[in-house]
Amino acid sequence: MGIREIEIGGNKLTIHELDDVCDSVTGRALTGSWLWDSALVLSDYISTQGRLDFDLNGKTVLELGAGAGLPGLTAALLGASRVVLTDVDSLLPGLRKNVEENGLGDRVEVKELVWGIGRVTESGRRVGGIRFGSDVGRVL
């Protein structure tokens, strides 16, 4: 896939898209390994209209099914004091690479979250704050 330079609200983010991350069961490429249009739309919203609807300064942000992590990284650039990016284990190295590439390791952490199985917790407490999901579905 490659490297994409994305400008959001006057800030530039570097996003690495991976084409070699596959589901261990099906062998198919994981859709979270590349940047979705919905992530671009949500990131643009966060940097424009979102600034009017909510204040990210000093807040904790949880991004569910982060994939490449663009909305969460955008939140960190716009003042969130802590961002937790979550996805399945095989996508975590790509997320960590994007956090590192953009110099946001002091505010952004990456955690595994398997839908329907896990929780994102700290010391036994759920991670709260603002929650983002740019392309997630509800599993019943």
Image (spheres, rainbow, N blue to C red):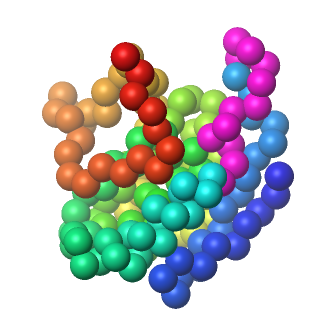
Decide if residue 105 is in sight here: no
| Residue 30, quarter of picture | top right
Residue at horizontal 65 percent and vertical 54 percent from the top: 35
Q: Which residues are magenta?
A: 24-35
**In the displayed structure, would residue 134 be above or below residue 103?**
above
- Residue reaching furthest to the left: 125
**In the displayed structure, would residue 125 be above or below residue 100?**
above
Viewer-nearest residue: 139 or 71: 139
Residue at horizontal 83 percent and vertical 52 percent from the top: 1
Q: Where residue 113 sits: x, y (%)?
A: 43, 30
- Residue reaching furthest to the bottom: 10
Q: Where residue 41 sits: x, y (%)?
A: 52, 64
Q: Where residue 100 sits: x, y (%)?
A: 58, 60
| Residue 102, quarter of picture | bottom right
Q: Where residue 139 sits: x, y (%)?
A: 41, 21
The rendered magenta stretch, by its main secondary structure, is classed as loop
Residue at horizontal 41 percent and vertical 47 percent from the top: 133
Left/right placement of residue 124 relative to residue 94 reads left
Decide if residue 126 is in sight here: yes
Q: Is residue 32 magenta?
A: yes
**In the displayed structure, would residue 113 be above or below residue 32?**
above
Quarter of the figure with the C terminus: top left
Left/right placement of residue 102 relative to residue 47 reads right
What is the number of callouts on the image? 0
Viewer-nearest residue: 103 or 28: 28
Left/right placement of residue 69 relative to residue 51 reads right
Viewer-nearest residue: 69 or 46: 46
Viewer-nearest residue: 24 or 123: 24
Residue at horizontal 31 percent and vertical 27 percent from the top: 119
Q: Is residue 29 magenta?
A: yes
